[in-house]
Structure formats: structure tokens, C-alpha cells
Image (cartoon, rainbow, N blue to C red):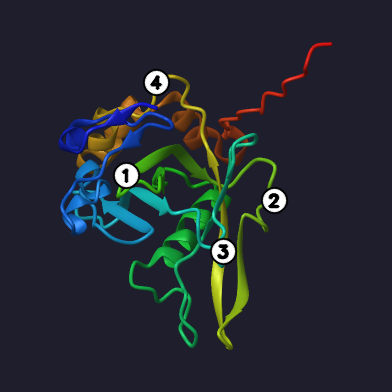
């Protein structure tokens, strides 16, 4: 498996399934995501805003351990569908009023998707914990929604009970896009925050198609399982 060293993260491109190494310090300074991107070093939702003072998101990092039984984030590699849960885990709380405002962000991007107003849609970069120190693995560039999931099912609020307490949260569905062998260039990542209006010029073709056609333009990264049939 290809790996990128911790000291090389700031200039690294993003390649599907590549591992980005964490540091060796016994604190959050070893977090690789905050060295890959100008984002915080904690939380599942990490939004990076544009630098034009619009306060609009340039892009969003989604981070998951894939290990929480109560919140079973899941990637279906065969279809490219990625299920991700919101960030309200407290009873008696408005599910939009979370520290990272992740659920509010989900509402905003799915509203954009279903209104076909995609000019301000931020791309999502999905990472998962590898289980080896602070190392992370890039799962891909994601768009909200899926052409095979109806608009009333790709973002669903639900009630859950834990330790005798009830609260609401979101279940959201994204699609990992097929960026082919090119991956995600550092030039595009930088332009998203520095000059967002011009960033579409250097965006991956699959992202351009999504922005142009919306839900119908989603081109999923599908990886069918190989079934080995034994010979006689």
C-alpha cells in the first residue's frame, strides 16, 4: 500500500486508498489531516472556508473510524455509496446546534443538491482511520446524494436512544466519485479556498460533470468484487 510520510503531507496530492502517515508526537500535533489541510485537528466534520470572506465552505473533510457500532459509517465499495452520520450525540440538544455545525452543513449541502444550485457546492474529501497510530487512508472525493437514492432518502433525520436518553441525528448518503487514475491535485485543493470561482478550471472532470448535471451527473467509483472460481 502506498504511503505518504508525515513530513511530506503539506504538498501531497490525494490518491484513492493511499495512506497518509501520522506523526510520532504523543498529542494532536501528530494529526495528519491538519497537515494535509488548513483545518482543525479534531472532529469528524472539518470545514475549510474560502478566503474571500464569504464564509462559504471551500471544501469539507469527512473523517471516520468506521468502528463506532452506534454510528455505523459505511462505504459500499461495489456501488460507491458512502453512509455518514451527523454530529449530534447529546440528548436535549437541537441537532443543528453542534460544536462543528456538521448537521447544519449537511442540511445546507443537500438543499443545494435538491435545488440544482451547485455553484457553491463544496467537494467532500473522505478519510478513515487505519488503526495504525494516527495514520489515515483516503477513500475518495465525494458528492452528496446518489442517482439511485431518491431525494427524500439521502438525508434523513431519526431518533436514537442511548443510556435511556433520546436525541435526533442525521443519516446522510454520499457517492465516492470516479476520479480515474488522476486522483486529486494539490493545485485544485489550493484553488478551492484561494480562488473558488476559478477552481472549476482545474477540477477533476468527474466533479465538473456533477456540478453541471447535479444528481444525474454523479459518476460513482465502483469496485466489483472478484469472485474466484476454482478449476476442476
Residue 229 sits in quarter: top right
Dot 4: within a 10 Å radius of its alpha carbon, few (fewer than 14), some, or many (20 or more) residues?
few
- Decide which of 153, 14 is in the foreground and name it: 14
* Cβ atoms at labels 1 and 3 below 8 Å apart: no
Dot 1: within a 10 Å radius of its alpha carbon, few (fewer than 14), some, or many (20 or more) residues?
many
Q: Residue at x 50, y 57 (%)?
A: 67
Instruction: Work out how far the residue at label 1 is from the one at label 2, CA to CA, in angstroms.
Output: 35 Å
Q: Residue at x 37, y 67 (%)?
A: 101
Label whose residue precedes the other's in the sequence (3 or 4)? 3
Judge depth for marks 1 and 4 and give the one in front. Answer: 1
Q: Residue at x 44, y 67 (%)?
A: 87
Label whose residue precedes the other's in the sequence (1 or 3)? 3
Q: Which residue is mark 2?
A: 150
Kindly state the secondary structure of the residue where label 3 is placed: loop
Is 221 positioned to the left or the right of 43 in the image? right
Instruction: Work out how far the residue at label 1 is from the one at label 4, CA to CA, in angstroms.
Output: 22 Å
Q: Residue at x 43, y 32 (%)?
A: 17
Numbered circle sitting on residue 69:
3
Label whose residue precedes the other's in the sequence (1 or 2)? 1
Kindly state the secondary structure of the residue where label 2 is placed: loop
Judge depth for marks 4 and 2 and give the one in front. Answer: 4
Dot 2: within a 10 Å radius of its alpha carbon, few (fewer than 14), some, or many (20 or more) residues?
few
Residue 22 sits in quarter: top left
Numbered circle sitting on residue 135:
1
Relative to 25, is 96 above or below? below
Dot 3: within a 10 Å radius of its alpha carbon, few (fewer than 14), some, or many (20 or more) residues?
few
| Residue 77 in the image, given as x and y percentages of width and height | 59, 36
- Decide which of 99, 34 is in the foreground and name it: 34
* Cβ atoms at labels 1 and 4 below 8 Å apart: no
Q: Which residue is mark 4?
A: 182
Amino acid at each position: 500500500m502506498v504511503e505518504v510520510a508525515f513530513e511530506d503531507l503539506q504538498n501531497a496530492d490525494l490518491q484513492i486508498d493511499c495512506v497518509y502517515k501520522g506523526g510520532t508526537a504523543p498529542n494532536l500535533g501528530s494529526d495528519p489531516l491538519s497537515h494535509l489541510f488548513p483545518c482543525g485537528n479534531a472532529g469528524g466534520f472539518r470545514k475549510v472556508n474560502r478566503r474571500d470572506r464569504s464564509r462559504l465552505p471551500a471544501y469539507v473533510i469527512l473523517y471516520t473510524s468506521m468502528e463506532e457500532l452506534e454510528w455505523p459509517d459505511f462505504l459500499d465499495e461495489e456501488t460507491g455509496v458512502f453512509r455518514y452520520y451527523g454530529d449530534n450525540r447529546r440528548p436535549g440538544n437541537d441537532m443543528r446546534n453542534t460544536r462543528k455545525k456538521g448537521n447544519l452543513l449537511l442540511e445546507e449541502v443537500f438543499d443545494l443538491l435538491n435545488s440544482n444550485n451547485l455553484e457553491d457546492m463544496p467537494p467532500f474529501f473522505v478519510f478513515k482511520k487505519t488503526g495504525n497510530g494516527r495514520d489515515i487512508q483516503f477513500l475518495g472525493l465525494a458528492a452528496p446524494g446518489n442517482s439511485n437514492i431518491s431525494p427524500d432518502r439521502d438525508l434523513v433525520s431519526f431518533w436514537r436512544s442511548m443510556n435511556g436518553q433520546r436525541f435526533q441525528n442525521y443519516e446522510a448518503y454520499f457517492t465516492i466519485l470516479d476520479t480515474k487514475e488522476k486522483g486529486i491535485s494539490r493545485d485544485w485543493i489550493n484553488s478551492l479556498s484561494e480562488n473558488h470561482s476559478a477552481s472549476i478550471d482545474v477540477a477533476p472532470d468527474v466533479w465538473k460533470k456533477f456540478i453541471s448535471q447535479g444528481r444525474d451527473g454523479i459518476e460513482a467509483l465502483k469496485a466489483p468484487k472478484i469472485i474466484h472460481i476454482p478449476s476442476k
